[in-house]
Image: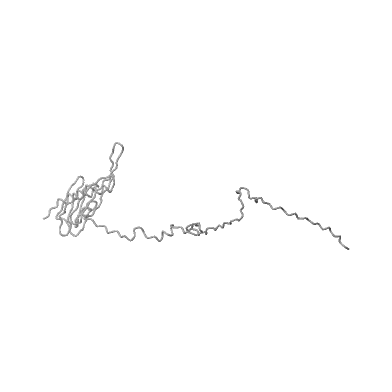
Amino acid sequence: MTTPMEPEITQEIVPEAASTSVPMQEIGTPTESVGVVEAVAEVTPAPTSEVGAPTESVGVAGVVAPRTGGRSSMRGRAPRGGNRARPPRERGEFDQVTIDARRVARVMAGGRRFNFSLVVVIGDKKGRVGVGLGKGVDTALAIDKATRDAKKHLFTVPRTASGSIPHQVSTKYSSSVVEIIPSKGRGLVAGSAVRTVLDLAGVTDVVTKIHSRSKNKLTMARATVAALKKLRTA
């Protein structure tokens, strides 16, 4: 049994005419003109740096320039100032101790004005000692004034060969009463401002007593100075 042959359908292909129109572009992009030769620009992406590493910049010619500075470069830097060693500070002729520091107020027309009052004792521990008082708008100025005042009131304490005093002495200055008694082999037995004055004067082997309730260190220091000035050598 033969199958009937289907008629062969022929389709005529009509050649399309060459179009000279510019190809359509996406919406929103600017129109570009097509030249005879199209230049393809090759874009080289910058290398990705690690986390925490300094960012590298890409130059015009594609050369990677490392970034200067940063923490990694500062670690190997030499310390500022080089190896310059400070010269040793020269020790002064006198030792200096501040025994009292107070802030005092003065009432003015515009309000209260504050100053600082300091008591300084200086001595060379070889028999010379002095007590000074200084006031200023800051502590540095007050200490400078007190030191100069103490140097003006320097005096020499008469001592024995062992560093003690020749005899017993007692003095009252303002509200403070101080007594100094020589005691062989006892060392320096004293307290408060009396001990500071005797220590900087180089006095030892003495026992001191404060016969007053006053806690004012300035009056106790000046009472000690007045007692030491009353000493007489044999």
Mark count = 0
Residue 211: percent from the left, percent from the top? 20, 49
Camera-nearest residue between 200 and 86 = 86
Camera-nearest residue between 72 and 55 = 55
Residue placed furthest toward the bottom: 1
Residue 51: percent from the left, percent from the top? 50, 58
Determine the image quadrant of residue 181: bottom left
Q: Is residue 60 left or right of residue 36?
A: left
Q: In this view, does 170 lie to the left or right of 8?
A: left
Residue placed furthest toward the front: 36
Image quadrant containing the N terminus? bottom right
Camera-nearest residue between 167 and 24 = 24
Image quadrant containing the C terminus? bottom left
Residue placed furthest toward the left: 234
Residue 113: percent from the left, percent from the top? 29, 41
Residue placed furthest toward the top: 109
Camera-nearest residue between 102 and 44 = 44
Residue 32: percent from the left, percent from the top? 60, 50
Q: In this view, does 70 lie to the left or right of 122?
A: right
Coloration mode: one colour
